[in-house]
Image: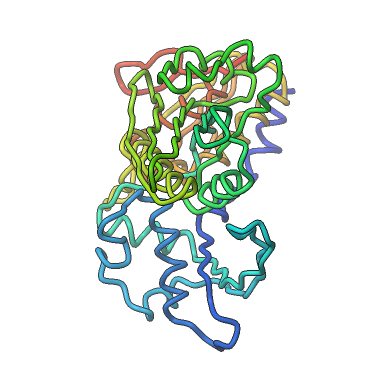
Amino acid sequence: MLLAAVVILAGLGTGQARALYVGEAVVMAEEVTDAAALMSALDEVLVRLTGMAEPSPVEALGLRVADARALLQSQQRVRIERLAEDGSRVDELRLRAEFYPPGVDALLARAQLPRLGRERPAILLWAALDDEEGVRLADSPLFDQAIRELGRRFGLDMILPLADATDLAWVQLSDIRGGFIDSAQPSADRYGAGVVALADLRAGEGEWAGRWMWRIDGRDLSVQVQGDSLVDLVEPGMRAILASLVERFATVTRPDGGLVRRVVIDGIVEPIQYAEVLRVFDQLSLIEDFRVLEASARSVSFELYLSGDGLEDVLRIGRTLVIERTEADGTLHLRLAR
């Protein structure tokens, strides 16, 4: 039965994650075309993939409007309703541009810039707010909007906890303000998050200040932030988290055409398990293609065609395929997590 499933399912194509290659930029309603907005949209995509800040990727790569148009797949103008600082609702006109993923990836490969693919851990954010109303969990609609918008801009899956009785049994305000990440780790399993972040945000005399703290692979990181408002403290914190994910998990596409890696998935006894393996392969941006080498009663061997190094890292992010061992010739033995 399993071998029949291999024959039937091996032809499934590899999909592409489009959202990472869609950028947005604010435009004026009276403009017919706006080259600057197109460049800003492309820059947003490149920041999302590389984590670069200063200089901007468009500037660092010396890109022109013609380069952006050559990568462009589609564009449209969209109206987004946003919450203004005074609490009113305003419409914002944006250019939404979708760029050709292989073209963007090739651009970064030629420049030998690291690229963070779609394998990104969800981030559970606990934020404490200290202002004239006292100390509490951050409950500002403007703060929530900033988290959502910057999550889109940076390609970060941000989760804000429900803060119900179950959550508060694990995490106290003193834990957040003190940077005790261990206290918040149990809540990560509840929300399916791979990273826990804490943000201690405080209003001062005429300005706001705070500290973001998070842990990646057992390494504790933090950044101090300042701004004129609560919302001003969000972007530098989330940008720093993105940069740390790029540093840890990004890969550089090999200019020589990539790697070939043999993997063996052990413990595959049902067609549904094989289908789950193919689903994982389809989602991993590092895997450009694959083929079945052989199938036995309890395992399937694949040859994976990779765009670069780092297969073990992206597998650990996904946590669906568990690494069992590596043979001397580099063959990787995996199993489905239970």
Horizontal and vertical percent position of residue 258:
33, 45
Q: Nearer the viewer, residue 177 or 289?
A: 177
Residue 203 against residue 70 in the figure, above or below: above
The tally of labels here is 0
Residue 18, quarter of picture: bottom right
Horizontal and vertical percent position of residue 164:
70, 21
The answer to whether any part of residue 124 appears in the image is no
Residue 30, quarter of picture: bottom right
Q: Nearer the viewer, residue 129 or 318?
A: 129
Residue 195 against residue 147 in the figure, above or below: above
* Residue 80 relative to residue 173: left or right: right
- Quadrant including the N terminus: top right
Residue at x-position 65% and y-position 29%: 276
Residue at x-position 51% and y-position 63%: 23
Q: How is the image coloured?
A: rainbow
* Residue 73 relative to residue 251: left or right: right
Q: Nearer the viewer, residue 109 or 172?
A: 172
- Quadrant including the C terminus: top right
Residue 167, quarter of picture: top right
Residue at x-position 48% and y-position 17%: 174
Q: Nearer the viewer, residue 102 or 69?
A: 69
The answer to whether any part of residue 157 appears in the image is yes
* Residue 287 relative to residue 57: left or right: right
Horizontal and vertical percent position of residue 9:
68, 38
